[in-house]
Amino acid sequence: KQQWQEIQKQKKQRKEEDILVGERGGFQGFDQWDFKELPIVQHKQEILYCVENYSCVVVIAETGSGKTTKIPQYLVEAGYAINGKKIGVSQPRRIAAISIANRVAQEMGCIIGQEVGYSVRFDDNCDEELTQIKYMTDGMLINQILNDPLLSEYSVLMIDDIHERSINTDILLGLLKKIRRKNPQLKLVISSATIDAESISTFFQERVTDPKTNQVIANLTSQILYIEGRQFPVDIYYLKETTRNYVVKAVQVTLEIIRAPDKKGDILIFLTGQEEIEAFIEIIQKNFIGDAERQNLKILPLYSGLPLEDQMEVFKPSESYVRKIIVSTNIAESSITISGVVYVIDTLFHKINYYDFKRGFENLLVVPISKAAAKQRAGRAGRVQRGECYRLCTKDQFVQLYDNSTPEILRCDLSTFILQLKTLGVGDVTNFELLQQPNENAYAKALEQLFALKVIDKYCNLTQEIGHKICDFNLETKLGVLLLNSFKDDFGCSQQMLVLCSMLSLQGQVFYNGFDPATILKQKKKLGAKEGDHITLINIFLAFNHLKSSQARQGFCSDHKLNIKSLNMAVKIHDQLCKQVKRMGLKVNNSEDDIEGILRALVTAFFMNVAQLQPDGSYRNLRNKEILYLHPTSILNINFPQWVIYSEVVFSTKYYMREVSEVDPKWLLELASHYFEDQRLKQAEQKHGKEIIAQNEYEKNKQKIEEEKQKDPVMG
Ligand code: ADP
Ligand code: MG
């Protein structure tokens, strides 16, 4: 054992020194079925030995080495899926869970949904009795903890791709730490493609003692397993000069590869989001020469807002003469394998959620990726043969990238996280054990917000009337509150709100991105309502949904410069929300044409986002005094009302309120009196009063929270 551990140490060192151009090796050609050479295969015994002898195994291996597809199969072979127990594998993404389950079912020669199944939101094909391996999104696994708090259904749980450090992964790790104290038999396999494994391993190492007798009940051990070997080397290229527009540059490089006579194989391009992907596709299509180029290429967009059927297109085999160009966000970075990729074009950017603590809103920012992520992306080119990766930056710029990115939990609004933990019965969220703790201020802000929205009470418990209910919508917190409130007789506009919440949940833009703001504004005026952008969004949806044929919808969208993909998506979200509302037994009401009802309902969720017109045409947020501007596409640019309410802020050169509606300031006192007391409104200059109150409230209740912690109902 000692010897073996020594070997592990050496391997780790070698891995740290690893450079991208490795040795040639692995399986030849494009045969997907030849798996003899997958790096994992040689480590089968080692993996099984570790799972047998340690309670947690951290497997570090390159993307594509066979972690996700092979390890669960080995565990089945070794008898971990008997006596009604299953092997569970959590994935950061829906598309990964589904495509990999299909793949593994194929490899094992069984029908999907029997021995191998998947479970994602709105789609679960697992069989209670038959299923041995269950692939699922980490969100689904968290949901499952609600019904099966100790996860006793599983013998081994594999938490996959944790290097992505999505907030759900972090929550899951924290929950598992609690669960294993009560269920020490549950084995864990944690997989990651990057080498920072010590902190994870230490996190799961502990002696569990009986609080009364102080006796050790379980010794939870942990071992790191380094697996080396990459299939093919990847040559990396950098730009000689910086580029000002990476989308255009990416098109150029793609065309060069296509037109080079000696370059064969599929191309994978990394961009940051739907808008860029669509822009890329538009530009490249304009630049194709002749029909040959057009016919022999298949351009496939891939981003999470895309309907799942369209996402799955990338896995479909095509004619051998057809070359695939996959234009993707970081979905294709590590969780899924698209066979046939030989060229990677990496813009080195991604879009992340970033919570602006000072201004109190979440922002989508396009920022450079980390070196670790760039390495992942480049690795995608070496799957089937020697590959090439074109990094669209200079070498000097590349050196300046961070080694690793900041995990989501340290940079996001914690209110959803808190809500999720509360639903799971975790009493004191601020002491919930995580790999990395967000700072106190982040907790305080989120608690303050939830308190103001009446989602939690002053003892930090979920409220019956709102907190317990909105979790079921699966919407962002404020939208959940908005939707729920709209069912009250007072507002009576839940039918319209179902539409609005669907539209506001979209990741992409409603209007097509290729147009300047003035053109969009012109279209908006045709479809819009003077009361603001929210009503306009409802109008657009209703007009679109009213058309039944896809041809008519297409026509409507191109006439008004609307993005048909976004609208189709909104229709889907709307269907799902309607079903959910029905399941919850809520009765949809519709006070037609009562625009005031809708606007008043908006106040109940977005009262923190109220701003007043300033003499220079800017707006000033009532709460934190920040200066904001109407987005150039906002329909309110026509009349600049005195008071407005907004649901989103975007930053480009200034802070712009994007979806904005007019409000009557009287409503603020009427509907959010707990937030805007009368005198406060008069002394609008006074410094963020309510924040301080909420903070005090929170301090006062610390004692209460401590007590709560003791009786934490689910996991203690
Ligand atoms: P890891 O989890 O280590 O990144 P995987 O287990 O996902 O690796 O993939 C191992 C290999 O299986 C890949 O290199 C690829 O060749 C093949 N593979 C995985 N999924 C698919 C798929 N959907 N279609 C074709 N080949 C696949
Ligand atoms: Mg994987």
Image (tube, rainbow, N blue to C red):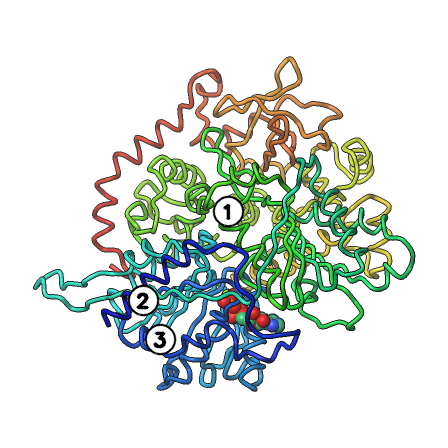
Mark 1 surroundings: few (<14), some (14-19) or many (≥20) residues within 10 A: some
Label 2 to label 1, Cα distance in Å? 27 Å
Q: Secondary structure at mark 2?
A: helix
Q: Which residue is mark 2?
A: 7
Of the two numbered discs 2 and 1 in the rendering, the one whose residue sits closer to the viewer: 2
Q: Position of residue 239 (x, y in %)?
A: 66, 41
State the residue position of label 1: 371
Judging from the image, what secondary structure is the residue with disc 1 in? helix
Q: Is mark 3 within 8 Å of ligand 1?
A: no
Secondary structure under badge 3? helix
Q: Residues within 10 Å of mark 3 (few under 14, many from 20)?
A: few
Residue 46, numbered circle: 3
Residue 319 relative to residue 395: left or right: right
On screen, residue 383 above or below 416: below
Which badge, 3 or 1, is on the more N-terminal residue? 3
The foreground one among 500 and 217 is 217
Of label 3 and label 2, which has the lower sequence position?
A: 2
